[in-house]
Image (spheres, grey):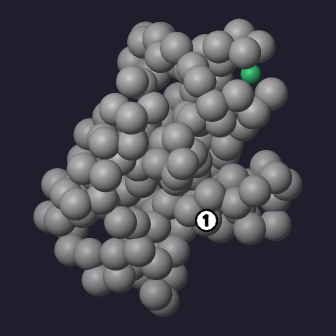
Amino acid sequence: MSMHRVQFQPGLSLPDFLAQFGSEAQCERALEQARWPEGFRCPECGDAHAYVLQGGSRKIFQCRGCRKQTSVIAGTLFQSTHVPLTVWFLAIYLINQAKTGLSTLALKRHLGVSYPTTRMIRDKLIRTPSEPDSNYTFQGNLRSTSASKKSVQSRKQARDA
Ligand SMILES: [Zn+2]
């Protein structure tokens, strides 16, 4: 399974982070970009075309080839948790920022979720590199500038045309 990168700019300030990743839609878009940098690919048959359905709060992609439905979190460590992507992203950001480590209790206070949820998030993120289902790495530089957003939009328009 290939690796996908959700990367934050080094030294990204908290206000900048929140401006870029403060909403569920922004986080979902960032994951979509990390997972399919060249545009949608069906995980089942590799088809590049999909119908986009709005399934509840999350976008559902239905492959035009095999009709398999997938979401951007399907098959990732974010799947089958009820934790919003905004909380995951904030956890990733805080863990990355705290070079000397961050206790589960400190993380819990920042995230505002329960202790067991915090521990689950922390375990998944920290163990991620060795897990077979880890699709994402979280380091370095998430290019989410307005320029790259524009290029994503134009790629999308080209794909939809
Ligand atoms: Zn397919």
Q: Could one spot residue 105 in this view of the protein?
A: no
Please state which amino acid type lies under the numbered disc 1. Thr
Number of disc labels: 1
Residue at (35%, 66%) from the top-left corner?
Answer: 143
| Above or below, 16 relative to 56 | below
Quarter of the rendered image showing ligand 1? top right
Left or right: residue 22 versus residue 40 is left
Q: Nearer the viewer, residue 138 or 4?
A: 4
Question: Quarter-wise, where is residue 147 in the image?
Answer: bottom left
Residue that appears at 46% across and 21% down: 59
Image location of residue 29, percent across then percent down: 39, 41
Locate residue 43: give its quadrant: top right
Point out the image quarter for the C terminus: top left
Q: What element does badge 1 sit on?
A: strand
Nearer-the-camera pick, 142 or 94: 142
Q: Is residue 17 left or right of residue 124?
A: left
Determine whether, in the image, residue 9 is placed left or right of residue 72: left
Q: Residue furthest bottom?
A: 100
**Which residue was labeled with disc 1?**
137
Most foreground residue, 120 or 150: 150
Q: Is residue 109 above or below residue 138?
A: above
**63 is higher (above) or lower (below) than 37:** above
State the residue at coordinates (42%, 12%). Answer: 54
Q: Residues within 10 Å of mark 1 (few under 14, many from 20)?
A: some
- Compared with 1, 92 (above or below) is below
- Horizontal and vertical percent for residue 60? 53, 18
Q: Position of residue 132 (x, y in %)?
A: 85, 54
Q: Position of residue 113 (x, y in %)?
A: 41, 43
Residue situated in front as seen by the camera: 152 or 159: 159
- The answer to whether residue 75 of the structure is visible from this angle is yes
